[in-house]
């Protein structure tokens, strides 16, 4: 069961690994990120950030989609994290059960517009998010679970 689907360019860190996991009662973190799944240094770093007692799975976006749609993840209370809006859209396009996306952190880059304290979006990312919102997917901005939820529209 998917408990939370989050976009965060940092992938796994204290806010995700401890605050969110505890708040939603997750027992497995799935990192859907092509670079991390294929880079042994990034993979090792993610493993170091994993909370004790929580399963960590790092897969490419495509392999993550296959795992979720196959039902192999159904036994877990799943926190899914991806690093970009484009990857999140790919996941949402393939998994219609996703009804909410948490926007946690999207770093500032050339050409981005700041939409919250930690969310910087390129025009094409805003278009992707508007498309998701138009399909009825809630887009919430929250760094940590104790913050007040702000809806991105």
Image: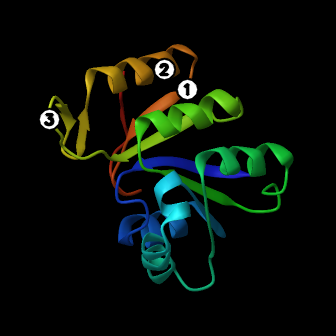
* Label 3 to label 2: alpha-carbon separation: 25 Å
Percent position of residue 129, x then y: 42, 24
Above or below, comparing residue 128 to residue 84 in the picture: above
Percent position of residue 120, x then y: 23, 37
Crowd around label 1: few <14 · some 14–19 · many ≥20 (10 Å): some
Instruction: Please give the residue where the numbered disc 3 appears in the rendered image.
Output: 110
Q: Quadrant of residue 102?
A: top left
Percent position of residue 112, x then y: 18, 31
Q: Quadrant of residue 103?
A: top left
In this rendered view, identify the residue nearer to me: 19 or 82. 82
**Callout 2 secondary element:** helix
Percent position of residue 114, x then y: 17, 34
**In which quadrant of the rendered image does the C terminus lie?**
top left
In this rendered view, identify the residue nearer to me: 117 or 124. 124
User: At 37% from the left edge and 72% from the top edge, which residue is drawn?
Assistant: 14
Instruction: Please give the residue where the numbered disc 2 appears in the rendered image.
Output: 133
């Amino acid at each position: 069961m998917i408990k939370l689907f989050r976009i965060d360019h940092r992938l796994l860190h204290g806010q995700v690994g401890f605050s969110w996991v505890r708040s939603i009662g997750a027992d497995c973190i799935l990192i859907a990120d092509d670079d991390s799944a294929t880079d042994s240094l990034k993979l090792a770093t993610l493993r170091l950030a994993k909370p004790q007692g929580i399963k960590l799975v790092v897969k490419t976006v495509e392999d993550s989609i296959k795992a979720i749609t196959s039902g192999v993840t159904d036994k877990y209370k799943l926190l899914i994290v991806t690093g970009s809006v484009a990857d999140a859209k790919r996941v949402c396009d393939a998994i219609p059960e996703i009804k909410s996306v948490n926007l946690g952190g999207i770093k500032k880059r050339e050409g981005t517009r700041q939409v919250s304290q930690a969310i910087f979006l390129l025009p094409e990312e805003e278009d992707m998010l508007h498309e998701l919102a138009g399909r009825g997917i809630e887009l919430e901005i929250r760094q940590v679970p104790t913050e007040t939820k702000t809806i991105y529209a």
